[in-house]
Amino acid sequence: MKALLLILKNLRRNKLRTTLTALAVIVMVVLCTEAATVLFWVHQHVHTQACQSKLLVSERWVAPSCIPTRYLALLTHQEGVEDWTLWNLYTGYLDTSRQSSRKGFGLATRPDNLIAMHLGLEKLDPAAVEALQREKTGAIVSADLMQQMNWKVGQQFTVLSSSHPHKDLRFKIVGVLPPGEYVRNFFFRQDYYEEGTGNKETITCVWLRLRDAETAQRVASRIQKQFQHSQPELKVETESAGVARFVSREQALLSVLKWVVAVLVLDMAIVLSNSISVATRERRVEMAVLKVLGFEPVVIMALVVGEAMLLGAVSGFVGAALAWLSSTLAVHGFLPSNPATRIFFSFPIQAAMVLWGALLGALVGFMGSIVPAWNAWQVKVSDVFAKIA
Amino acid sequence: MSAQPLIVVDNVAKEYMRGSERIVVLRDVNLEIAAADFVALIGPSGSGKTTLLNLIAGLDQPTSGRIWFDGLEISKLDEARLARWRTNAVGFVFQFFHLIPVLTAYENVELPLLLLNLTARRRREQVLMALDLVGLSHRLHHRPGQLSGGEQQRVGIARALVTDPKLIVADEPTGDLDHVKSGEILDLLQSLQQELQKTILLVTHDPAAAARARRVLRIDKGTLVEDRSMHSGRFRLFEWTVQ
Amino acid sequence: MVPLAYNYRNLQVRWKTTLMTAFGFTLVVAALVIMLAFLNGIEAACIASGEPENVILLSKGNQDEVLSQMERPLVAQVENSKGVAVDAAGRPLASRELFLAVHHRPPEGDEFHFLQVRGVLPAAFRVHSQLHLLSGRTFRPGQSEVMIGKGVQRTHHFQIGDTLEIGRKQWQIVGVFESRGAAFESELWCDLNELASQFRRDGLYSTVVLRAETPQGAEELAERLRNSRSVSVEALTEPKYYQKQAEQTRLLQTAAWVIAWFMGLGALFGVMNTQFAAIGQRSKEIAVLRILGFPARAILLSFLIEALGIAAVGGSFGVALGAAANGVTRSFSLGARSIDFAFRVDGPIVVCAGIFALLMGLLGGLLPALSAMRVKPLEALR
Ligand SMILES: Nc1ncnc2c1ncn2[C@@H]1O[C@H](COP(=O)(O)OP(=O)(O)OP(=O)(O)O)[C@@H](O)[C@H]1O
Ligand SMILES: [Mg+2]
């Protein structure tokens, strides 16, 4: 406790330096938090259990996929299938400008098990799903589209279709998707899709939920074998394998992102280390005095490390909290929509990241204080006083 | 003594505000200093010696009263013009030498010349001459850290005289030196006055130092209380050492 | 002016701090250079892909070949549009193409990935005049042969003579081609009719590329087709089409700069810290300089130069480090397709990064330098 007080006092001594160091760390942690959120998303989708027990069935060879509707019954009656849903992709422009920045991607699906079958919809208001079941032309729209198009729930909109020429559809907004998983998307009813586009023959893809990863593997190979000689052939992969494939396409981007995080962490450590070094150099005499008074070198070292870690942790906490705050504000429409804030719709920062930021800051503080602490350890009483005299 | 004094201090007062409290440091100071004189300023600690020196050297402005230097009223100049004037007119010697630690003796002395429009060659000549005068020709490329206290102070003096100013002010230049080294520095200052006709204004606590001067001013609680002209400095010194 | 030796030696004396601060800059600038080189490489690949004489046609409402579908009558009609160049035999220079993203599972390992396959007719080689063989030969129609782009060879390590399973057929690789770094290098080319029947796409095309006599002619042709009442297609000159594709990286560009500025801000605070500490330690020296007659702005300049020096040293190492990425090849997905590109560090990027570093040094050095300028000589020496 005493030590903490001493550390706090030391930090308060040169307020300017403490503030600048803190600012540097805060700024970099803001960035780190978002980058880590993206990397964490990837990790989670490739490795969680839920993603490994869910199968995505699509056409074997060609994208975009096209599965005959007659396959559906065969797929969903496989032994071990607990639940299923389907997607039909319906793309188009949301206004007459027909700019690619005004494109929306509709997913026609079953409304009844919408939440259960889709990752990241746990936070979707069940009332929205009920409304979708009541309203045939209903659509549940992603938060970023709502904000970009300035739409309100209850309003209607028309999609000028590019995937289904001359089949423009009109929708009524009955709910908003939680930010995160779905960006530029809206969900609507499969029956409305069939009626509106006249396409009852094909499905883009089918989702199957199995008991566990092992069953999923078994069912996947069974389906693949069963449809081996049909035309078109089917491809079955777990959701995590699908994400992994998607991610491997973005490998270049992800590796740049990883470098960025590494650079940020290193940079923070440098700034902290530099600042703590200056502070310890200024305090050489005091440290010598402490040693004369009988303090053990370990204690003196601990004071230096503690100072860096405390400063790092507090700044990390503040930085991550700022990032979380801006993410939350952006998602709720309190910040102007621009390319920089739109990232939060795809990768909203979780409140838990704030603790992670503090931890990172402390860690970086520790890294940065190793050298200065070593120097403090090495302070020789005789040297210091010889220089003074 | 020449008819026209180099420095005229007319009814000068200096006050400082410390919080809401007003501190009068100098009051009713009237003084004339002739060119090529060697003046020592003595008095108890806190009496205002440094303050008066700073005013005369153009580092500070009086609260009231006026100061002329060689016919120019320096108490009227603004800060930028004062700075330019200082480079030409006044050389400074400090108690703690205040050399720039990262620069060599040569570079330290050259520093004020960089403010004047001189060719590199001219600068070099002047620097070498100044260092020669203080007897440090063999230490040109040493850093202050590699010089003894006495040598450092000589570099300081060389820096003060390199621009060939009329006035050299020295605030306790021997305060940080031992007896022998002090003597050497004082010899040097004295020779500057005698051989180069520099006006020297020396603030000191050291009676031996004051004894070198041709005129001694004593200041107490912000006013001049004594103004004595001395005999030859060497004689006085002899007398003092005999005592 | 305060001599530069003064700044230089001071940086030298506290070299550990100087190097650490500069290293902060090095990292930030290197990151910036790499990010910009990444985007520059993609853009260069896109720009290289377009020949100004060519007009690319897609079905109405589509901006991407992957989703575009055009039927035979429409294609036959546009091929005979006015302004399309003709070859020696009097046939229009038009290339009908079918572009498919095909799943491929390499024999070892069981992860799917995409191969981008383009079915073409012989006319394609006259329309895409920049394409030429590096080794092997062109495919023979109907013989299940493919030729692969340089980028495909690099990423998948295919060799001439290898067979590939695409759809249910085995295809043999007979040649490798290049196309001045263009997007085509990330594709496999084969016979259009064979590909179409394989994937039940008979009579369907993704795109038709028309060649005009001149770039000017191409512009006019595209304009005419866009506004035509009789045909309903998207028509763009190739450079415009690929430029549009490259626009998808706009968002990344913004992101790169946002990241750079945030990082730079961190480095900036680092310099500030270092300089404030330096000024704190050297306030007496500053006072002496002022007393000797150096004006306040000389002090300001001196300390600014010092900060800039740190930034310049760190920045140049950063540029050098970032330039090491030059030429490294990766693939990147643009819309539904992926292209191979090489990180490209060029003059503008170096200049940009240099200015960025100096700007950060300047901003980081300004506040401390201002405070140095305000050092009161008499008080500092008391
Ligand atoms: N900037 C200032 N603010 C407030 N008070 C000041 C300031 N400068 C000087 N003083 C006060 O003015 C008085 C005279 O100071 P000065 O430095 O001139 O004394 P001095 O005679 O040189 O003393 P010493 O022999 O100790 O150097 C002192 O009481 C000092 O506290
Ligand atoms: Mg004094």
Image (cartoon, coloured by chain):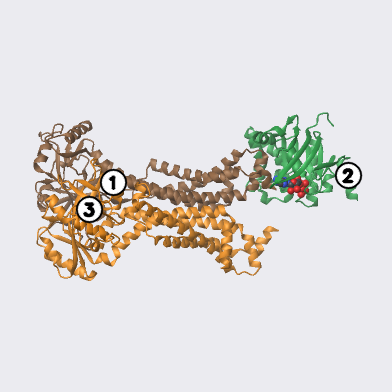
Chain colours: A orange, B green, C brown
Residue B35 x %, y %: 80, 33
Q: Chain of mark 2?
A: B
Badge 2, how many Cα within 10 Å: few under 14, some, many 20+? some
Left or right: B22, with C180 as reference point: right
Q: Earlier in the sequence, mark 3 or mark 1?
A: 3
Q: Which mark is residue B236?
A: 2
Left or right: B42, with C178 as reference point: right
Amino acid type of the residue tagged 2 in the rendering:
Arg
The secondary element bearing badge 3 is classed as strand
Residue B161 x %, y %: 72, 38
Residue at mark 3? A139
Mark 2 vs 1: CB contact within 8 A: no
Residue A16 x %, y %: 56, 52
Q: Chain of mark 1?
A: A
Q: Give the distance between the C-alpha atoms of the residues marked 3 and 2, in whole angstroms.
A: 108 Å
The secondary element bearing badge 2 is classed as helix
Residue at mark 1? A149
Taking A200 as reference, is A74 above or below it? Answer: below
Left or right: A95, with B14 as reference point: left
The secondary element bearing badge 1 is classed as helix
Mark 3 vs 2: CB contact within 8 A: no
Amino acid type of the residue tagged 3 in the rendering:
Ala
Taking B124 as reference, is C327 above or below it? Answer: below
